[in-house]
Structures are given as C-alpha cells and as structure tokens.
Amino acid sequence: MQLHDFLSTIITLLKEHSSLFKQLADRQNNSPQPLQLISPPKDEILDLKQFRDLMNIGPSTYRRRILDGTFVPKLIGGKKYFLKSEIEHLIRHKENKKPKKPK
C-alpha cells in the first residue's frame, strides 16, 4: 500500500510540474554544453606506512600522537587510513619547523 501511495505522489508531482521539467529538458537540449554536476576533487588515501613515511615518525611517536589526538585516522573497512587533504596542515607544519641545534 505504501508503494502505491509513493508512486501516486510521484505521478501527481510530475503532472503538476510538467512545465518545469519541459523547461529543464529544453535548456539541457539547447545549451552548447550539457549541464554537469561539480564533483569534488579526488583525495589521496594514505595507509599507516605511507603516513608514517610522509611524516617521518616512528611507531612509538605515532602511538603517542594517536593517543593525544594529534592524528585522527579514518576507519575504512576496519582499517585506519588518513586523507591527505586532512593532514596537509600537519605536513606544512613539519616542513616549516626549524631543526633542533645540536648541543
């Protein structure tokens, strides 16, 4: 019964707003380029090893930073990954950091 109500609502909306759909179709057909949806740029996914190599840190430092909340990985399929766009500020901070002077 719910499917029938849903379909009848869709048909009613199509009948009421048919002129809008016709205008949209005409605009799509008459424009030199078809309308395109803007898609977000692809983000690079880094696994644990790639992330540690990029940040140049060891396992113990990585664990400390996870515990103190500096690094927050994403869970994808039960594994931890990092999105490069989300850690770019950490990478820039690491590059701009002055090296320690030897004693």
Image: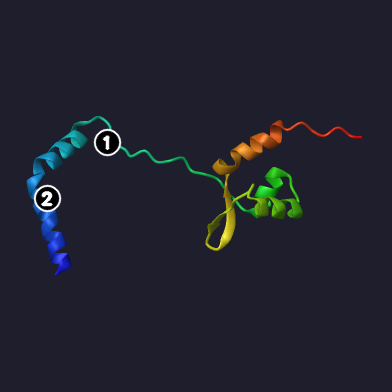
What is the residue that sits farthest to the bottom in this orientation? 1
Q: Which residue is pictured at 70% across the width and 37% down the height?
A: 94
In the rendering, at what x and y percent does residue 85 appear? 55, 41
Residue that appears at 13% across and 63% down: 5
Q: Amino acid at mark 2?
A: Leu
Viewer-nearest of discs 2 and 1: 2
For residue 52, above or below residue 20: below
| Residue 33 appears left or right of 96 | left
Residue ID for mark 1: 34
Q: Quadrant of residue 24?
A: top left
**In the structure shown, which secondary structural element does the residue marked by tag 2 occupy?**
helix
Residue 23 appears at what percent x and percent y? 14, 36
Q: Counting other residues with Cα less than 10 Å from the Cα at mark 1, is it few (<14), some (14-19), or many (20 or more)?
A: few
- Please name whichever residue, 39 or 13, is drawn nearer the observer in this view of the structure: 13
Residue 50 image position (x, y, % from top left): 66, 49
Spatial distance from mark 2 to mark 1, Cα to Cα?
25 Å
| Apparent side of residue 44 relative to residue 92 in the rendered image (left or right) | left
Nearer to me, 76 or 35: 76
Q: Which residue is mark 2?
A: 13
* Residue in the picture at 28% in, 36% down: 35
Quadrant of res 22: top left
